[in-house]
Amino acid sequence: MSEALDIDFSFSRPIPGEGLTAELGARPWQNPPQFSTVDEALGYYIPRMAQEDFTKSLINVMEMGVPLTSLSNTIMLSGVMEGKHSVDVGILIMPSIIETMKLLGDAAGVEYDTGMEKNTSTVDNNTALMVAEKLAASKDDVKQPVEEMTEEPVTEDEIKEPLAGLMARRN
């Protein structure tokens, strides 16, 4: 009466997660970089940063208050992922990329955050405060004053319900 199960015990099937991997050398960062020196990498980035479409986008992002260190880090990592240069060359060119962005920002007359100041947390707090104020102003809700709560100690007589649940202590 028992039916035979049709189970394939073949070991030629893919292992779990195999579809998420690629052959060695199939990704751009697994191959030798296109630019192996700092000079070659800067020769790639500087002319592209001087293009009008990049400059307009950069100015808009600078006006939003995004630190230049974050932007240069993003540019560097995308270059590594595209196989343009290695991580170590990318780290070496980051100061030059930041200086180029500062030059473009100064030429456009934009105030920018380099991300290297000591008081960057106050800038972030001020930005968060401005965003919160804008959100609060955009709501049509009437603001109600918040009543101050006073803490009163809870006595054992007030706890009448037995504690229940997975982590409750047993009596």
Image: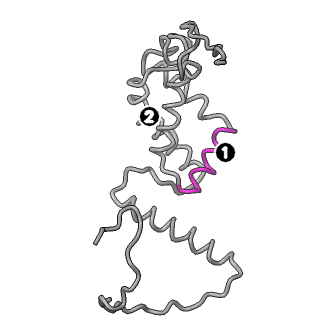
Residue 86 has which mark? none
- Quarter holding residue 89: top left
**Which amino acid is tagged 2?**
Ser
The answer to which of marks 1 and 2 sits earlier in the sequence is 1
In the rendered image, the vertical position of residue 101 relative to residue 135, given as above or below = above
Near mark 1 (Cα within 10 A), the count class, few <14, some 14-19 or many ≥20, is few
Near mark 2 (Cα within 10 A), the count class, few <14, some 14-19 or many ≥20, is some
Query: Which of the image's four quarters has the N terminus?
Result: top right
**What residue would you read off at disc 2?**
96
Q: Is residue 59 magenta?
A: yes
Residue 142 in the image: state x and y as whole percent. 66, 87
Q: Secondary structure at mark 2?
A: helix
**What residue would you read off at disc 1?**
56
**Relative depth, front residue between 27 and 92:** 27
Residue 63 in the image: state x and y as whole percent. 59, 56
Residue 29 in the image: state x and y as whole percent. 50, 18
Residue at image point 38% right, 28% down: 92
Residue lying furthest front in this view? 1
Q: Is the residue under label 2 in contact with that under label 1 (CB below 8 Å)?
A: no
Question: Which region is colored magenta?
Answer: 53-65
Residue at image point 59% right, 28% down: 47
Q: Is residue 71 magenta?
A: no
**Which amino acid is tagged 1?**
Lys
**Relative depth, front residue between 125 and 160:** 160
Q: Main secondary structure of the magenta part?
A: helix
- Quarter holding residue 125: bottom left
In the rendered image, the vertical position of residue 143 relative to residue 86, given as above or below = below
Residue at image point 49% right, 22% down: 41
Residue 138 in the image: state x and y as whole percent. 68, 75
Q: Secondary structure at mark 1?
A: helix
In the drawing, does residue 121 fall left or right of residue 23?
Answer: left
